């Protein structure tokens, strides 16, 4: 019997990883409005990147919709100098719809600063961002922010956050996180809530301590993955990448491995690094640094730049799946083509494809109509932001009612996405809110008192039930309540949910809205249109008081014989209309309705414009034989 030869143990060269002690990269993550962008303002000021006297606010929220809506939509980075260290700070959005941006931002960093509002405590998106940070095993620095709030409950917020760590199965080493207290707006932080320094020094020092310097292997060939995209008016598309190993030099030939696996040789054009708010040209960018790279005309997220001799692509970037879909197609209304200059199916398709390049959390699918696509995303706001951007660029579109995406289990059962909802409200609205959520198949999971006449309620509800709920919620709580929700897994299809109680007022012919017609109609519901607005057959001009739709003639004129009353008298009596923004229109529409969006107008309409055909379709649907 012969012995098997001894297994050869390969002797690996012992490589020492090197750390860039001069660098730190950190993301600021939190629930919406907990003060991330404001804190970055203060960091920029104190590092000298911004004049202390400059009174600009939320500087990182640089695009139009971010300023108008007062929220961050895109993750962006800035670089500050603190003592001998260059700190790259990634500001991320806190709204759940833009969670994909947070996931992508985390791929760039070596640690996170988790902000929690000292009064509101951890909310649904706090949970989401913390879960992502723990999954990536990034060190966390907790900052209890806004400790100046009179309703702050600092100790409770710290223990609630500790509980959240445990709830998310944090490992032992993850539970030992440092805690700081801050008033981000005043640029102050400290290790005790009642002894804040006059600046953010304690926090910035804390970042140097807790976030490891980026590590690289000096012998590893170049490896840099594109984690974000930007555009320059002169240089075209820029890929943003944190160099993992090696050095990227201007003019170098590199292997460009695309996310579909194809490989090309290409030359590095201009290189830039960020300093404060400026992008400055660089000759070379080393490991651990973030570069903006020009010279690759259609570079995409997830592409790797690597060595030609020893190419080593990185695995693709993945993010959570979309949960909501909405159709976007050519404007098919009789008023199409009057205001926009981008009208054709080809242009819309090209624009949607372009959006996919920079936005990994979206998908675009064909529909059974050649002029319409279905866009899949994370939520209503994310999709509304896209449509708003498109109309500002000159597009006209027909946008359908958002619908949730369902899935089939292995044994063929249909499941739908669920949302975890947290509501903060004055106590007196408890009954009305419970009823609202129950109507939409929500189940209450918990209730807690703030001890100040306010209560916090937690529900689990099919995502479908939340479509269009916000307007009703704000009316119920007279604007005082706050509602936040986040994806919370799947559950069996909950059956029919009626999300809108009232029917629509539908105009039945082309013309201009008359004061005469408005006065006759306004007692029957709430109008969305003003005298003089142009409408067509099938325009939704208001909300009916009753559950069914009401066909009206909103363009009728007073008979000429009846000349006694003056026009001024009519004007006095006219109730101002409820003007619908794009977001409100998308919330409001029913299954058989859609929104005509042009650069100047948002018009609600029926899918089927012709009154007779629409009534026929409605009857068929009632009989249950409507085509699916
Ligand atoms: N009281 C108090 N309010 C603050 C403080 N810091 C920020 N705020 C306010 O909180 C609100 C939200 O601030 P942002 O910095 O936009 O919050 P954000 O976390 O970046 O929000 P998103 O990016 O939309 O998730 C603003 O009205 C700020 O003025 C603070 O230290 N104290
Ligand atoms: Mg922000």
Image (cartoon, grey):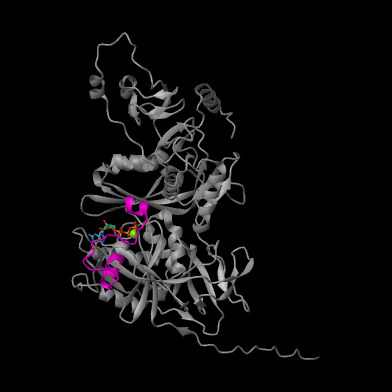
Task: State the image quarter where residue 306 is shown.
Answer: bottom right
Give the quadrant of the N terminus: bottom right
Q: How many marks?
A: 0
On the image, the x and y values in percent for residue 253 come to 58, 75
Residue at the outermost front position: 234
Q: Which residue is drawn at 56% across and 89% down?
A: 14
Q: Which of 223 and 406 is in front in this view?
A: 223
Give the quadrant of the C terminus: top right
Q: Which residue is drawn at 32% across and 34% down?
A: 578
Q: Does 93 appear in magenta?
A: no
| Whether residue 537 can be seen here | yes
Q: Nearer the viewer, residue 583 or 394?
A: 394
Work out whether 422 lies above or below 158: above
Q: Does 45 appear in magenta?
A: yes
Residue at the outermost right position: 1
Which residues fall within the magenta stretch? 40-68
Work out whether 565 lies above or below 267: above
On the image, the x and y values in percent for residue 99 come to 43, 58
Does residue 343 appear left or right of residue 127 in this picture?
Answer: right
Work out whether 256 lies above or below 620: below
Q: Which of 405 and 199 is in front in this view?
A: 199
Does residue 386 appear left or right of residue 85 in this picture?
Answer: right
| Whether residue 457 can be seen here | no
On the image, the x and y values in percent for residue 207 come to 34, 75
Does residue 549 appear left or right of residue 472 in this picture?
Answer: right
| Ligand 1 shown in quarter | bottom left
On the image, the x and y values in percent for residue 118 come to 26, 62
């Amino acid at each position: 019997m012969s012995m098997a030869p001894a297994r050869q143990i390969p002797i690996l060269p012992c490589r020492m990883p090197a750390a860039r002690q001069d660098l730190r990269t950190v993301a600021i993550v939190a629930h919406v409005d907990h003060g991330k962008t404001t804190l970055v303002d203060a960091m920029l000021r104190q590092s000298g990147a911004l004049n202390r006297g400059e009174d600009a606010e939320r500087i990182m929220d640089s695009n139009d919709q971010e300023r108008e809506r007062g929220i961050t939509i895109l993750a962006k980075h800035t670089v500050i100098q603190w003592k001998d260290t260059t700190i790259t700070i990634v500001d991320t959005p806190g709204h759940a719809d833009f969670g994909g941006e947070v996931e992508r931002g985390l791929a760039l960093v070596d640690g996170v600063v988790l902000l929690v509002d000292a009064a509101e405590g951890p909310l649904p998106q706090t949970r989401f961002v913390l879960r992502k940070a723990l999954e990536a095993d990034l060190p966390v620095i907790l900052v209890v922010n806004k400790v100046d709030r009179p309703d702050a409950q600092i100790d409770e917020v710290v223990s609630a956050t500790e509980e959240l760590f445990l709830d998310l199965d944090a490992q032992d080493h993850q539970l030992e996180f440092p805690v700081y207290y801050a008033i981000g707006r005043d640029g102050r932080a400290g290790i005790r809530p009642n002894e804040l320094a006059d600046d953010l020094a304690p926090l910035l020092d804390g970042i140097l301590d807790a976030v490891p310097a980026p590590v690289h292997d000096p012998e590893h060939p170049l490896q840099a993955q594109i984690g974000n995209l930007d555009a320059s008016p002169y240089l075209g598309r820029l890929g943003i990448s944190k160099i993992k190993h090696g050095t990227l030099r201007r003019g170098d030939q590199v292997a460009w491995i695309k996310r579909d696996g194809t490989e090309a040789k290409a030359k590095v054009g201009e290189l830039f690094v960020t300093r404060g708010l400026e992008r400055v040209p660089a000759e070379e960018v080393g490991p651990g640094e973030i570069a903006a790279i020009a010279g690759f005309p259609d570079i995409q997220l997830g592409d790797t730049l690597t060595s030609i001799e020893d190419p080593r692509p990185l695995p693709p970037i993945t993010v959570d799946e979309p949960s909501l879909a909405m159709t976007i197609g050519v404007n098919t209304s009789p008023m199409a083509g009057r205001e926009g200059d981008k009208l054709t199916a080809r242009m819309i398709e090209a624009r949607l494809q372009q959006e996919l390049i920079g936005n990994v959390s979206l998908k675009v699918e064909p529909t059974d109509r050649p002029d319409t696509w279905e866009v899949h995303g994370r939520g209503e706001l994310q999709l509304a932001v896209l449509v708003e951007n498109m109309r500002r660029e000159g597009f006209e579109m027909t946008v359908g009612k958002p619908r949730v995406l369902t899935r089939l289990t292995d044994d063929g059962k249909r499941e739908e996405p669920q949302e975890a909802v947290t509501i903060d409200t004055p106590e007196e609205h408890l009954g009305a809110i419970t009823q609202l959520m129950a109507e939409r198949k929500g189940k209450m999971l918990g209730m807690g008192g703030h001890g100040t006449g306010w209560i916090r309620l937690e529900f689990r509800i099919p995502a479908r039930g939340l479509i269009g709920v916000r307007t009703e919620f704000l009316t119920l709580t007279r604007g005082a309540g706050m509602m936040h929700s986040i994806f919370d897994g799947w559950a069996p299809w909950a059956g029919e949910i009626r999300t809108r109680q009232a029917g629509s007022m539908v105009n039945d012919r082309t013309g201009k809205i008359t004061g005469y017609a408005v006065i006759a109609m306004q007692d029957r519901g709430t109008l969305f249109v003003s005298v003089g607005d142009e409408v067509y057959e099938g325009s939704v001009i208001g909300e009916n008081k009753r559950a069914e739709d009401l066909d009206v003639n909103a363009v009728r004129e007073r008979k000429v014989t009846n000349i006694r009353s003056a026009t001024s008298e009519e004007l006095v009596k006219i109730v101002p209309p409820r003007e619908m923004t794009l977001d409100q229109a998308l919330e409001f529409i029913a299954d058989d309705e859609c929104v005509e969006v042009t650069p100047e107008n948002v018009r609600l309409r029926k899918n089927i414009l012709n009154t007779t055909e629409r009534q026929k379709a409605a009857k068929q649907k009632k009989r249950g034989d409507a085509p699916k």
